[in-house]
Image (cartoon, rainbow, N blue to C red):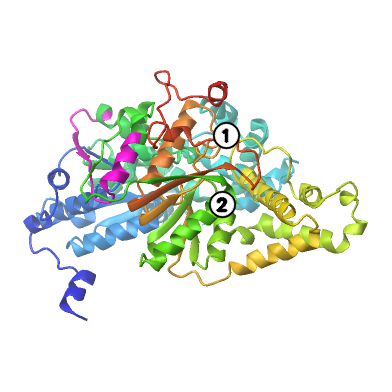
Amino acid sequence: MTAATHSTLFPRVPDSADAVLEGLDPEQRAVATALHGPVCVLAGAGTGKTRAITHRIAYGVRAGMLQPASVLAVTFTNRAAGEMRGRLRQLGAAGVQARTFHSAALRQLQYFWPKAVGGAMPRIVDRKIQLVADAAAACRIRLDRNELRDAAAEIEWSKVTRTVPSDYAAATAKHGREAPRDPAEIAQIYAMYEELKRERAVIDFEDVLLLTVGILQDRQDIAEQVRSQYQHFVVDEYQDVSPLQQRLLELWLGDRDDLCVVGDASQTIYSFTGATPDHLLDFRHRHPGATVVKLVRDYRSTPQVVHLANGLLSQARGRAADHRLELISQRPPGPEPRYTEYTDEPAEAEGAARRIRDLVAAGVPAGEIAILFRTNSQSETYEQALADAGVPYQLRGAERFFDRPEVRKAGAALRAAARFGGNDTLLEDAVDLPSQVRAVLSGEGWTGEPPAGSGAVRERWESLAALVNLAHDFAAARPDATLGDLVAELDERANAQHAPTVQGVTLASLHSAKGLEWDVVFLVGVAEGMVPITYARTDEQIEEERRLLYVGVTRAREQLSVSWALSRAPGGRPSRRPSRFLDGLRPGSTARAVEPGRSPSRKRLGRR
């Protein structure tokens, strides 16, 4: 190993507190040296927020102003917490606790349970699906597996927003949340779920926070013990805290204000899980004397990418938009974002795959390229196009299309129908291949119209709809094709995806791409109905879709391609239009006039 390689893998630990500050820009240095009282860091995408807060902790430790064991740094994923611990070690600040909210709460709950409650702590259920199923059965409500996932998600949302079963229906109405089924039924299942947990002496993931909050509220002696251990708090991704996590943080703090929060309201994309930027935006009201530092120097993306990101937010409306940050790229100029319109979705996927194949041939590592889409159901077309082009890929944050339970089950049903179709009454009135597939998949949950709202039921429908669409395309290409031919085609596609995917192009949804970055990013399917998604109806939901696209844009370091298709299938009616979010930003388009404080609704867009 050369000296240069060794220094890259094992960077030299700074030999003094002042050495910790070397290499920081003025704003990052302001963060690192603001060690007293409440501090709010508003950090845009790519501005080095993790660098700023880890150097802040390390500077405080090395200067003797912070004791490592008295610092608790909280973030939202184990990956982020691990990265933070690693950086702190490299800076000579080992011993600082860097954990997720759940990890920190669980540690405290396990330690204080014997003293606060007595006996052994209840077992934590790994997955709540079975408990939800038992609760639904006890309520005599039939739910399939995807409906169970949606019910579980509603229970999770209720608990992190501190909503009890009796208040569920009113809370969903207040938040404009579309319940996956009758709110009264969800509330009934939720109440029974809590009862079954008590009977079986188990707790779930959210209870870890709820019980820790309960103990700290009820036992002043235990609260004081925790506060004597931790005197200084840092919270990353503060725009994503839920009301429950905020309450836990308040109990950790007590009447002190040694708190540093870091966040960006323009990257709030998880409100469906209970996250809210309100705590970040209200920080200065709760702490009038807070030090506020804005990080706007973007070290990740070229000026061309940053210009588009700033343009997206300049059209935003609402509270988060009022606090947007104007990023300033620190990188050399790069190519302008490419905007490409395709006739149909397969052509869009093939176009992206061709360009990626050329990039890889030109020396761009496949692992530095990503294709980002709005929903996981879009992945199949791109999986197939990359496989056909001989480009390795890896799917992030979701199962491969043909590995999804509903797709495997649908494939088995189609295979059985192809084998015994003559005796299947479902197929009696099906005159062609697409109608045969629709008939078979209707028994698996496919319907002519999508279910309301988002969630697992909608995702399952999207997967089945993708198979129906594939049958239409297959029949158009081969008018004499049988159901058996289609099954063989599905098997061939599934097998093609079993190629090694190490160091491949990343396929990911926009949500699962948060926190990641690549040299080259393809944002695909950026059309009305997908971005923003069809079921985003309120102004708040539309604005969250805009922020989601902003997150996608800011994942790109050097090259960005944005594309959309005018129709779904080859030969289809070209009825789609590019996303309204691109109006005035892509060449040849003009900005759309919007009433102050409002996003254009789908109805008004249709009239225009």
Left or right: 443, with 188 as reference point? right
Please rate how many residues cluster around mark 1, counting C-alpha atoms within 10 Å: few if below 14, some from 14 to 19, many from 20.
Answer: some
Q: Is residue 264 visible?
A: no
Task: Looking at the picture, tell me which residue is in the foreground, 407 or 335.
Answer: 335
Residue 587 is situated, as x and y percent measured from the top left of the image, at 39, 37
Outermost residue, bottom side: 1
Regarding mark 2 in the picture, which secondary structure is present there? helix
Element under disc 1:
loop
Residues under labels 1 and 2: Cα distance? 26 Å
x, y percentage for residue 169?
60, 28
Question: What residue would you read off at disc 1?
Answer: 535
Along the viewing direction, whichever of 267 and 57 lies nearer the viewer: 267
Tell me the residue at 7%/55% (across/down): 18
- Tell me, for residue 347, which label it has, or none: 2
The part of the chain drawn in magenta is: 286-311
Q: Residue at x 80, y 63 (%)?
A: 484
Which mark is nearer the camera, 1 or 2?
2
**On the rendered structure, is 70 left or right of 589?**
left
Tally of numbered discs? 2
Q: Residue at x 12, y 55 (%)?
A: 23
Q: Position of residue 595 (x, y in %)?
A: 42, 18
Look at label 1 and name its amino acid.
Tyr
Q: Is residue 135 left or right of residue 443?
A: left
Q: Is residue 205 above or below residue 535?
A: below
Indicate whether residue 386 is drawn in magenta.
no
Which label was assigned to residue 403? none
Question: Magenta stretch containing residue 289, yes or no?
Answer: yes
Going from N to C along the chain, the mark reached first, 1 or 2, is 2
The quarter of the picture where residue 409 lies is bottom right
Q: Are marks 1 and 2 in contact (CB under 8 Å)?
A: no
Q: What residue type is disc 2 on?
A: Ala
Quarter of the figure with the N terminus: bottom left
